[in-house]
Image: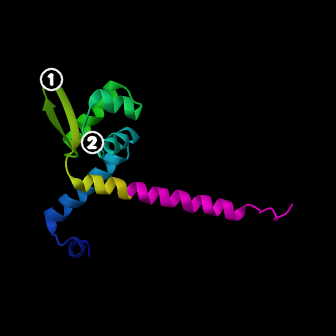
Amino acid sequence: MLSEMLELEGDELEEVILGLSETFKALSDSSRTKILLLLSRKPMCVGDLAQEAGISFSNASHQLRVLRNMGLVRPKKAGRMTYYALNDAHIERLLWEGVSHVKDLLNLDRRRIDEDEPREEEGR
């Protein structure tokens, strides 16, 4: 069934599934997710990413190395500075679909809480 869904077979099918799993694993770290979200808006250097994400410079540098090794971000030299950007539009769409999904879930949970709370009658 998976091979028909993805139109792949054998090693190619396994490679795509493993790659997708690795991509979601990258998103499982909140520091990496923050970095990717920031980079979805504009290229940034390590120091700015660290400051905006609220993480240390060394943590930002480490997470960027992980993201670069996974092919999710790419560096670009500008003089002595290195700026990082998302590697392609796929990861940006994946990120923002995820944000939309989580926001919808949180709104659903809030509505459930609101529905469970007794409402005050008007005029009291």
**Residue 29, numbered circle:** none
Q: Secondary structure at mark 1?
A: loop
Q: Is residue 61 above or below residue 16?
A: above
Number of numbered markers = 2
Circle 2 residue: 42
Residue 29's place in the image compared with 89, above or below, is above
Quadrant in which the C terminus appears: bottom right
Residue located 13% across and 31% down the image: 77
At a point 34% along the width and 45% down the height, the residue shown is 37
Q: Are marks 1 and 2 in contact (CB under 8 Å)?
A: no
Is residue 57 at least partly visible in the picture?
Answer: yes
Give residue 53's position: percent from left, percent from top.
39, 34
19 relative to 37 in the view: left or right: left
In the picture of the structure, the residue carrying the numbered disc 1 is 80
| Residue 85, picture quadrant | top left
Q: Badge 2 local density, few (<14 within 10 Å), some, or many (20+)?
A: few
Residue 100 inside the magenta-drawn segment: yes
Q: Position of residue 104 (x, y in %)?
A: 49, 61
Per the rendered image, the range of residues in magenta is 98-124
Label 1 crowd (10 A; few <14 / some 14-19 / many >=20) = few
Q: Quadrant of residue 21?
A: bottom left
